[in-house]
Amino acid sequence: MGNFSVVKLFKIFPFLTDSGIPGCLPDEKDQSHPMWLYVASLIGLYYLFRWYREKQVVSNLEDKYVFITGCDSGFGNQLAKQLDLRGLRVLAACLTEKGAEQLRHQTSDRVKTVILDVTKTESITAAAQWVKECVGNKGLWGLVNNAGIVLPHICTEMMTKEILTKTLNVNLIGLIEVTLNMLPMIRQARGRIVNVCSILGRMAAFSTAYCSSKFGVEAFSDCLRLEMQYFGVKVCIIEPGYFKTNLTNEETFVENFKKSWNDCSVEIKESYGQEFFEKTLNFIKVIMKRCCRNLNLVTDCMEHALTCSYPRYRYSAGWDAQFLYIPMSYLPTRLLDYLLSKNLQKPAHAI
Ligand SMILES: NC(=O)c1ccc[n+]([C@@H]2O[C@H](COP(=O)([O-])OP(=O)(O)OC[C@H]3O[C@@H](n4cnc5c(N)ncnc54)[C@H](OP(=O)(O)O)[C@@H]3O)[C@@H](O)[C@H]2O)c1
């Protein structure tokens, strides 16, 4: 049987006879097989193996509980509905009662909601206690840390401490505190933690406070993944590109940009100049207009991370993330800075 398989393998991949395996001496003709054929076949086999592995689904999905933060709108809201249709038990945390009520109307009775503000410790502990009562001794299969904000500021010098702390409190500190409160239940179920990061957690540009928070999420997730492997808990990171949600609402961005410009000192305004403000604002408007409307590209990655037996550690969601921003993040710093600054307006007092 073993010999039969080897013979068959050489028939399918005749160039393997060049490999020097005893009993499979190459003939003159076979020696002409180029190297790229070896490499292409190996890559093909790798992708075939990965595709097969990633098709395997965990069993008893209908018994599994998933807790999602930030379900009022955007990715969180869509994921709650998607997992509900897939038959999982969704514990959806919303910031507002209005958001929770709307979600309950649009989903089955498998979806339960709770009010959660990730910046408030008492709100987190109350939500964790509620989750404990819901899941009982089954434990929590999935935690999706999705809640997030962006408070746009034109440049780092115009970022106030308030903008920085608010952003870090929701996107990073809140995410960490929620995770620590849920961890005992996740360990119990040998479950999954899915942290929603961003391509701006891989390549920092244009929004210092937001990027700092998302780089923090990457670091926290990497540390946690290493430690949690001993408990059978998997930690996955989702890195979306630009998508059309409330977070990327053009009017809110423009409003925040104008506020950030109006609030900064005369000295800073003179250094950067009115033209800098206007051109940067136009540049941001162009980016906002190009945001992808297909949120499924992100929620499908989240669903895969929660339901596949062998989830990926990192998911790049969206064409811009996969083919532009993630490849760019590997460029040498000098080259990346050059490419990025080609799109930026220079300040009035630039040397
Ligand atoms: N959209 C993008 O292009 C993009 C790209 C990369 C990464 N992301 C990330 O994806 C995640 C979801 O964002 P989204 O695009 O779906 O935007 P979204 O529609 O604004 O969703 C964010 C959710 O978080 C909630 N939230 C805000 N502050 C909160 C707090 N203190 N406690 C609990 N919940 C809070 C919001 O509630 P309200 O609606 O009531 O304010 C909202 O439901 C975020 O982590 C974001 O950073 C988004």
Image (cartoon, rainbow, N blue to C red):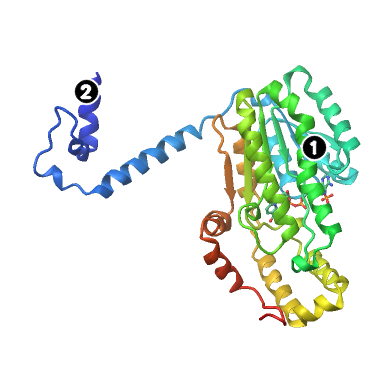
Q: Does the closest atom of ligand 1 sit within 8 Å of the Cβ of label 1? A: no
Q: What SS does tag 1 mark?
A: helix
Is 184 rendered above or below residue 11?
above
Q: State the image coordinates of residue 246 (x, y, percent, origin top left).
A: 77, 56
Q: Do we see residue 205 in this rendering?
A: yes
Q: Residue at x 79, y 43 (%)?
A: 173
Instruction: Check the image and name the residue furthest to the left.
Output: 28
Under mark 2, the amino acid is Phe
Q: State the image coordinates of residue 316 (x, y, percent, origin top left).
A: 58, 49
Q: What SS does tag 2 mark?
A: helix
Q: Do we see residue 70 in this rendering?
A: no
Say which mark, if any, is on residue 177.
Answer: 1
Q: Residue at x 45, y 33 (%)?
A: 52
Label 2, on which residue? 4
- Looking at the image, residue 224 sits to the left or right of residue 32; the answer is right
- Front residue of 150/177: it is 177
Is 159 rendered above or below residue 213?
below
Q: Nearer the viewer, mark 1 or mark 2?
A: 1
Q: Residue at x 73, y 44 (%)?
A: 146
Question: Dividing the picture into quarters, in which one does residue 301 lie?
Answer: top right
Under mark 1, the amino acid is Glu
Label 1, label 2: how far apart the Cα atoms are: 57 Å
Question: Dividing the picture into quarters, in which one does residue 16 lie?
Answer: top left
Q: Are marks 1 and 2 in contact (CB under 8 Å)?
A: no
Which of pointers 1 and 2 lies earlier in the amino acid sequence? 2
